[in-house]
Amino acid sequence: MHDVFCPITGDLAGVRERMNRYYKIRAGEIKEFAHLEKYAEKWICPALVLYAARINGKVTEKVVSLAAVFQFIYQAMMIHHNINEDCQIRENACADPRDGCQYPVLAGDYLYGRFFTTLCEWDIVKYLGPLSEIICMINEGSIKRLKCQAGGIVNPAVRREIVRLEMAELMAGCCRMGGEEAGADRETQQCLSGFGSAVGMALGMVENEWPDQAEKYFREAMAHLEMLAPGSDRENLRGLVMHLMNRVVDSKKMVG
């Protein structure tokens, strides 16, 4: 794991511990039914929750559980996002079930369900409403994306809207709710939400092979950071954004 996560290593271990309890089901391990390993090292969502809380107070057990909830949602979203829609693929006993449709759909749905049980277990059900809205937006964005894939050329404005629905709203929620759980006031929550949204837009642009559009959103994220209280955790978030920006630059160099 990269150095930008070092200040929250212990808290991320707590996130993993909560999640690992649910990866084994009676039918086997979740990783047997979906390519979960592809997303295991992408800890941006829980990192945003944890840093947003640290800026505004301290990381509590409920904050760690909230970070796990967002990672469940992120993993479920990515599993569904990468399901092979090719109807000619036959799901038989010889095929890898993770490459089909049925098992990944069920695995993703299972992880979405675990976000709810985690909210209940750690008495943070107050976030059920806004989290459900985020999931609805993710699915709306996915519907738009699939329709656009069938139609060919996608209008840039539509592509931005898809990224907003599928990624930016999720990361805005990470920051806003992480700050709220740590006691942030309404104005700070809005600033954190703007920061998370900008990071999500930037990463979504990269995921959608539009890296040239990512830079302006990274700059927007930095501008939101300037409105937060100064301190080591704000600088840690700045370091995280710089790390993500450098990865985009490196990937563009490799393509070039």
Image (cartoon, helix red, strand yellow):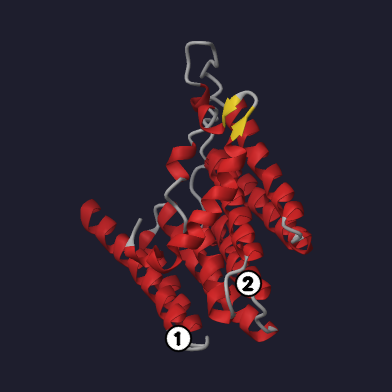
Quadrant of res 106: top right
Which residue is at 24% across, 52% downward? 255
User: What residue appears at the point 71 percent right and 58 percent down from the top-left corner?
Assistant: 131
Q: Which mark is residue 176?
A: 2
Point 78% across, 59% down: residue: 125
Query: Measured along the vertical axis of the image, is residue 87 above or below residue 75?
Result: above
Q: Residues within 10 Å of mark 2 (few under 14, many from 20)?
A: many
Image quarter of the N terminus: bottom left
Task: Point out which mark residue 50 bears.
Answer: none
Callouts 2 and 1 close, C-beta under 8 Å: no
157 vs 248, left or right, is right
Residue 240 placement (x, y as % from top left): 39, 69
Q: Which residue is mark 1?
A: 231
- Residue 139 visible in rendering: yes
| Coordinates of residue 241 in the picture (x, y in percent) | 40, 70
Please tell me in which quadrant of the rendered image residue 245 appears. Answer: bottom left
Which badge, 2 or 1, comes first in the chain's sequence?
2
- Amino acid under disc 2: Arg
- What amino acid does circle 1 point to? Gly
Please provide percent x and percent y for residue 209: 39, 52
- Quadrant housing the C terminus: bottom left
Q: Is residue 55 above or below residue 17?
A: below
- Res 243 quadrant in image: bottom left
Q: What residue sits 64% from the left and 60% below the top?
A: 66
* Between 234 and 15, the one nearer to me in the picture: 15
Q: CA distance from mark 2 to mark 1?
A: 18 Å
Horizontally, residue 228 falls left or right of residue 102, namely left
| Residue 148 spot, x, y in % from top left | 56, 45
Tell me, yes or no, if residue 256 can be seen here.
Answer: no
As drawn, the residue found furthest toward the top would be: 93
